[in-house]
Image (cartoon, rainbow, N blue to C red):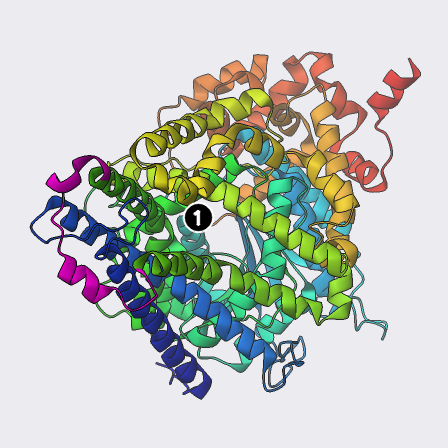
Amino acid sequence: MPQRPFNALAVFSRTGLLIATFATTWLGSVAFGRVIFAGGLPGLEGVPLAWDRPLFWLLLVLWFLFTVLLLWVAQGFWTATIGLLHMLRASPMSIVPVRRRAARVLPPSQLPTAAIVMPIYNEDPTRVFAGLEAMIRDVAAQGYTQAFDWFILSDTRDPAVWVREEVHFAALRSVLAGIRTAGTADGKAPPVPRIHYRRRHRNTSRKSGNLENFCHFWGAKYDSMLVLDADSVMSGRTIVEMSQRMAAEPDIGILQAPPTPVGRLSLFARCQQFASRVYGEVFTTGFGVWTHSDGNYYGHNAFLRLEPFMESCGLPILPGKAPLGGEILSHDFVEAALMRKAGYRVVVAYDLGGSYEECPTTLVDFAQRDQRWCQGNMQHVRLVFAAGFHPLSRVHLGMGVMSYLAAPLWMIFMIIGVVAAGVARFAGSDGVVADEVTRQRLITGPITPHLIGIGLFVLVMLMLLIPKGYAVLLLLQRPKLLKAHGGEVATVLSALLEVAVSVLIAPLMMVYHTRFVFSTLAGRTVTWGKQNRDESAASWGRAWRDHRHHMLLGLTATLVVVLVAPALLGWTAPVLVGLVLAVPLCWLLSSARVGTALRDVGLLLIPEEALTPRILRRANVAMRRTQRLSDHLDGEAVAEVDRLVADPTLLRLHTDLLAANPEPLPAPEGVDTEQAAVRAATDGLASLERAEQNALLSDPLLLGRLHRAAWSRWPAKRLAAVTAEPLPAMLERCRRGRRGPLRERRRAA
């Protein structure tokens, strides 16, 4: 077990965070207790309470909830403050974080070979393979092609997407065959990137099962692996630097590069991108400083040391039934905890850039992703006190739970506040017992309980907003970066716009998260489906269907507050307005047209748009090529699976990939492959059910028979696309951007 290095900065930061967080919470809790027990809450002015009345116990629960929620808000505030202080360092003007490199830079021949893996599930190959091509080219430009093996790990169940993945894989190998690599000016032939494609026969245990399968068959060959998501893009410089750090520091088990969302157009997505790019650095730096070697893993854009990962990070099966039992859905936090348990460091590389991802473009897509994460994080309740975990690993698991549990706690807090005010208003002297002696003891001079209550509200709001102010003030001191954000005025206006949007959508996310939490506790499970990564603006009809319940809830809640506790209307207005305006807000936020218009006037800009990094430029160029190939496949008269059967080159590629998969081929379940093959020989593979198509596509012998039958039985129209343009010609044409033969004939006609 590697020895854990002592770090004074981490110890000092953790101690400071602990003291500041609990001191803030204690002072706020004491002040809130003074408010509620001296009649300082709106609707309870001048009403002291006695312990033997129901209202007393109701407000005691309110006090407890406030304390828990204040603790949650305070830790975020002080984490950002630590980030600010670290970025400022000794001098107030020294606001650029240290960009350190590995202690010793190894040449490619000495750097341990790492695997770079991208698990995919029914994803659009256009985006997947464009990102891969860009990263491979960027690594090659660093001269480190031979230091990495690339793996596309497919769990795709849609046979048409499966075939498209293989076509794009063939295209990727073709365009990279002659790639120019840095450091080969001596006349030696440049190394060819090693790219592999594997489709798992059975996608058990979701993404974690996909990675486990890779580790079982290939993991022993590599010292480490970089895990990517389908929408991940990382610069070659960052990939090489992370690999160097893994080689230089063998006690690192997980090295996480914080991803930055880029590339989306909708107003909702652009707000996320701006917030992450401007505010994220302060929070990530603070988190990285105080966690030090006890950080966390986000599931992608991270290097994992394979030996301890394979030995120690196997996920347990939780006792009981789903959703709180069974397979663990959110594997990343648990794997980080297991890695720390094994004695290896988990480090968040907050000083690294060049790590990117995409974010959902609509509020509904964002919420659907959160629903999966919510169920997974709620399972972590059962692991917080698991034997052997490092204390900070327990903190990370607990924070993951609290990130979703906070929403229902806020909702319950507000409901109890309204109910308490209503009871005090309508019950009168029957609901409370006045104790003037107690009340006078709690009132200290001119500072009345009502003023303390206002002060607490302002305090909580400031702790939520000040970290954003930190980030904006730091940005104003960095001229080049500030210019890339549109300048001083545009940056401040963008920050105000982002805050306004955040305030409006916060109650919607509170309702979503509350529903997700109670749905999970009620035993409802979520399905593992394809994630929507497209720009899909919501129509008015869709906005109404998705958010009418939010609007009705807002109108009902407004009516209740007006009738029961009108004194609370002003305090609850930020929540009520967001709910009442849910439908038009959803429509507006999903609009790429609005987002683009704001970009054109310089609002919500991020540097990756004004000063586009080379890796993103490479991805955009590659996307144009992969999009041409996808458009061609969309326009073909023959289905993807039928092209595979008829095209000898594509069929050979497919069978070679099947043969290269070390996973034994399972017997088909519930499919008579012989009977299905007979029908496919006449009607085509596309005429079969999806399960039948997958079974036949997994059987090389039956595919060979189908290929011979296709050329003897299929009509000429079905074979026209294949005869006019075999796979090699199609790939070359799409690479060069020329029209296909069939389209040329149609255009001429």
Q: Nearer the viewer, residue 129 or 297?
A: 297
Q: Nearer the viewer, residue 525 or 71?
A: 71
- Helix, strand or loop at label 1? It is helix
Residue 354 to residue 375: above or below: below
Q: Nearer the viewer, residue 447 or 128?
A: 447
Which residue occupies 85% across, 37% down? 737
- Residue 82 lies in the magenta-colored region: no
Where residue 160 sits, quadrant-wise, is top right
The amino acid type found where label 1 is placed reads: Lys
Most distant residue in the left direction: 52
Which residue occupies 39% across, 78% down? 14
**Residue 283 in picture, x, y percent from top left:** 51, 65
Q: Would residue 415 be seen by someone viewing this image from the given angle?
A: yes
Q: Would residue 322 be seen by someone viewing this image from the given angle?
A: no
Where residue 188 sits, quadrant-wise, is bottom right
**Residue 8 in picture, x, y percent from top left:** 43, 88
**Residue 32 in picture, x, y percent from top left:** 29, 60
Q: Nearer the viewer, residue 715 or 276?
A: 276
Which residue occupies 55% across, 32% down? 586
Where residue 79 sits, quadrant-wise, is bottom left
**Residue 69 in picture, x, y percent from top left:** 33, 57
The magenta span reads 425-448
Residue 413 to residue 632: above or below: below
Residue 6 to residue 194: above or below: below
CA neighbours of label 1 inside 10 A, class few (<14), some (14 to 19), many (20+): many
Residue linked to disc 1: 207
Which residue occupies 6% across, 50% down? 52
- Residue 443 lies in the magenta-colored region: yes
- Name the side, left or right, on which 632 lies relative to 387: right
Most distant residue in the right direction: 748
- Name the side, left or right, on which 693 lies relative to 90: left
Q: Quadrant of the C terminus?
A: top right
